[in-house]
């Protein structure tokens, strides 16, 4: 009926009518036009524009399992139905498809109604159902949204195998717009304003968002046409949550003023992503030039080469280097502190900067190299008694003692262990915990990871 109304009655007279309209009437006309546009989209026509099917078939050809994050809400139920229809149409093996429901234990409905609903949906489609529960509770002052996201991925990845399986998530166009605006308000840079990627790797797992170009209204139209049941989460209406506040209060106002802001923001995110990809490509090439290995299998940066780059390139080099090694990036303030100390530290000093929970990430400069460590990688083992640990041929393992003198098989006089470790390039923070191998409890014949006396062989 709406399409008929527009084509038979309104459209032939549109030009004449609009010339006589007041501003208020023009606004009404614009809303009618948008309603007609939405009506034309009804029926799930977006499905034909997705290369969802080819992505799934390629993954299955590579022996992947397909997992869907299922909450029971509109978006994930539509994604599950779409995926099932592709499997059914192409006669794919349904044993390769599973849905994972995560009970966040933040709402009482989740413990019974939602969990049972998701289980029934999976039984209807005859696919494997997996249920997980988040045991932890948010800490005081911790964002509930960040807490839920972190633990949700942890539970997903219990099942999704690295470098093989695919996790499908039901984020859509409206989610993308909310994400970009939310990050902008938090002061994010180009990487954050790139929004969510359609297909990307996180912790060696492949995550795929096939609905990222699809609007919420199109998803709703698909559900209505296909008579899909889904859960309405009452927490979506609570404006205490930042994203809900944007969705309920800000986006309607923006849409009234600027039209389809979701499409515009998503288009902007695409441009940011292209710029970020270009920057990432350049930075990756430059990192290859300045990365250098250390005797003990460290990957370091050559400080003499690093310091020649402009400030804004140095920042991006450090950030990319940390990301490549899956280290949490420091705050902007901490990053400025890192660069300042690297540039100004005297040659005989070892600048050390830490950040993260319990200061677990540590960056240092030593002998014109920049080192990266986690606190747990550096363990002081002086409290361990290794006096009874003996190997064949009278070889004993010990740890360093301050002021210690050592002997070598081919030298008559003792030398300072500290000086010897310095000459080997052993960083100071390793010297107290590195394993030393002695022959007959007197002669040093090996330093773990650095040196081995040829005479011992």
Image (cartoon, rainbow, N blue to C red):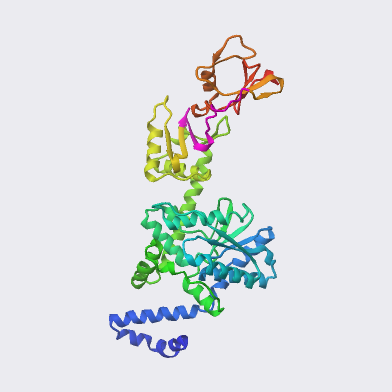
Give the total of numbered labels.
0
Q: What residue lies at 46% left-to-right and 33% top-to-bottom?
A: 364
Please determine whether, in this image, residue 444 is positioned above or below residue 12: above
Residue 383 colored in magenta in the image: yes
Query: Residue 435 placed where, x, y %?
Result: 59, 26
Question: Which residue is at 46% across, 42% downward?
Answer: 317
Looking at the image, the residue that sits furthest to the left is: 22
Does the magenta-highlighted stretch encompass residue 371? Answer: yes
- Judge whether 180 appears above or below 387 on screen: below
Residue 436, by quadrant, is: top right
In the displayed structure, would residue 125 be above or below residue 456? below
Provide residue 27's location: percent of width, then percent of height: 33, 79
Please give left or right for residue 231 compared with residue 331 in the image.
Answer: right
Q: Work out whether 96 lies above or below 435.
A: below
Please, which residue is most extreme toward the top here?
412
Q: Tell me the magenta residue range.
A: 365-387
* Residue shown at 58% from the left, 51% from the top: 204
Q: Position of residue 431 (x, y in %)?
A: 52, 26
Q: Position of residue 15 (x, y in %)?
A: 36, 85
Q: Is the C terminus in the top left, top right, bottom left or bottom right quadrant?
A: top right
Q: Can residue 456 be seen in this view?
A: yes
| Residue 374 visible, this orientation | no
């Amino acid at each position: 009926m709406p399409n008929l109304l527009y084509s038979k009655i309104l459209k032939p007279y549109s030009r004449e009518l609009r010339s006589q309209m007041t501003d208020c009437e023009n606004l009404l006309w614009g809303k009618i036009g948008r309603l007609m546009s939405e009506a034309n989209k009804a029926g799930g026509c977006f499905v034909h524009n997705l290369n969802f099917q080819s992505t799934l078939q390629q993954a299955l050809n590579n022996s992947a399992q397909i997992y869907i994050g299922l909450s029971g809400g509109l978006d994930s139920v539509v994604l599950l139905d779409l995926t099932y229809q592709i499997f059914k149409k192409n006669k794919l093996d349904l044993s390769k498809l599973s849905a994972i429901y995560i009970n966040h234990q933040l709402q009482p409905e989740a413990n019974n109604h939602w969990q049972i609903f998701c289980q029934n949906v999976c039984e209807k489609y005859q696919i494997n159902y997996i249920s997980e529960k988040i045991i932890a509770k948010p800490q005081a002052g911790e964002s509930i949204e960040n807490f839920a996201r972190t633990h949700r991925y942890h539970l997903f990845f219990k099942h999704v195998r690295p470098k093989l399986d695919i996790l499908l998530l039901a984020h859509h166009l409206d989610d993308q717009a909310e994400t970009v605006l939310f990050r902008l308000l938090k002061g994010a840079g180009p990487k954050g304003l790139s929004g969510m990627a359609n297909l990307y790797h996180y912790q060696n797992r492949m995550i795929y968002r096939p609905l990222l170009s699809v609007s919420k209204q199109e998803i709703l139209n698909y559900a209505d046409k296909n008579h899909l049941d889904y859960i309405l989460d009452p927490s979506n209406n609570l404006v205490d949550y930042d994203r809900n506040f944007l969705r309920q209060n800000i986006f309607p106002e923006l849409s009234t003023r600027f039209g389809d802001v979701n499409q515009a923001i998503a288009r902007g995110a695409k441009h940011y992503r292209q710029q970020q990809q270009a920057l990432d490509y350049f930075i990756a090439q430059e990192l290859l030039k300045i990365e250098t290995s250390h005797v003990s299998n460290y990957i370091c940066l050559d400080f003499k080469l690093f310091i020649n780059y402009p400030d804004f390139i140095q920042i991006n080099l450090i950030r990319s280097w940390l990301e490549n090694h899956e280290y949490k990036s420091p705050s902007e303030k901490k990053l400025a502190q890192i660069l300042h100390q690297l540039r100004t530290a005297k040659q005989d000093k070892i600048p050390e900067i830490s950040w993260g929970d319990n200061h677990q990430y540590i960056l240092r400069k030593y002998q014109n190299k920049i080192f990266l460590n986690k606190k747990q990688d550096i363990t002081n083992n002086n409290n361990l008694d290794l006096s009874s640990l003996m190997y064949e041929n009278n070889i004993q393992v010990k740890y360093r003692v301050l002021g210690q003198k050592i002997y070598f098989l081919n030298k008559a006089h003792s030398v300072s262990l500290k000086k010897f470790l310095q000459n080997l390039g052993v960083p100071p923070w390793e010297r107290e915990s590195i394993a030393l191998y002695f022959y007959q409890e007197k002669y040093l014949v090996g330093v773990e990871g650095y040196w081995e006396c040829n005479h011992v062989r």
